[in-house]
Amino acid sequence: MDPKMAEKAQEIVTKIQNDPALLKEFEAAPAKTIEKVAGINIPGFLEPKIEQIVKEQMKNGGNTDPMDIIKKFL
């Protein structure tokens, strides 16, 4: 993974994890929350994949490293 992309991804993860309101928003609408925090536009075809991965993560009790999840897209 490109070091700059990894750094940006970690920044996004940290912001979401450290803000209870953002975390709740992320659980309800992950793609939209990532767009908001990162200031990017996620293509519509990726949104269902993001939703699926986040639901899998929550089902597993959140034990997966957030960077491992992000790497699924890279």
Image: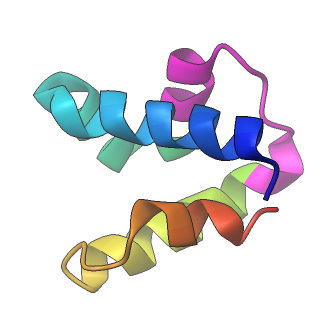
Relative image position of residue 31 (x, y in whole percent): 59, 40
State the residue at coordinates (24%, 72%).
62
Relative image position of residue 10 (x, y in whole percent): 49, 42
Magenta segment's dominant SS is helix
Specify whether residue 25 is painted magenta: no
Which residue is the extreme one toward the front?
Answer: 3
Q: Which residues are magenta?
A: 32-46
Position of 38 with respect to 29 (left or right) is right
The one nearer the camera, 30 or 39, is 39
Position of 12 with respect to 31 (left or right) is left
| 74 shown above or below 52 | above
State the residue at coordinates (48%, 32%).
12
Position of 54 with respect to 32 (left or right) is left
Relative image position of residue 15 (x, y in whole percent): 33, 27
Q: How many marks?
A: 0
State the residue at coordinates (41%, 41%).
13
| 69 shown above or below 4 | below
Residue 57 appears in the picture as rendered: yes
Residue 58 figure quarter: bottom left
Residue 25 appears in the picture as rendered: no
Specify whether residue 40 is painted magenta: yes
Position of 26 with respect to 33 (left or right) is left
Please name the colour scheme applied to the rendered image.
rainbow
Locate the N terminus and report the quarter of the image it occupies: bottom right
The one nearer the camera, 58 or 12, is 12
Which residue is the extreme one toward the bottom?
Answer: 60
Relative image position of residue 24 (x, y in whole percent): 21, 38
Locate the C terminus and report the quarter of the image it occupies: bottom right
The one nearer the camera, 38 or 58, is 38
State the residue at coordinates (28%, 82%).
59
| 49 shown above or below 22 | below
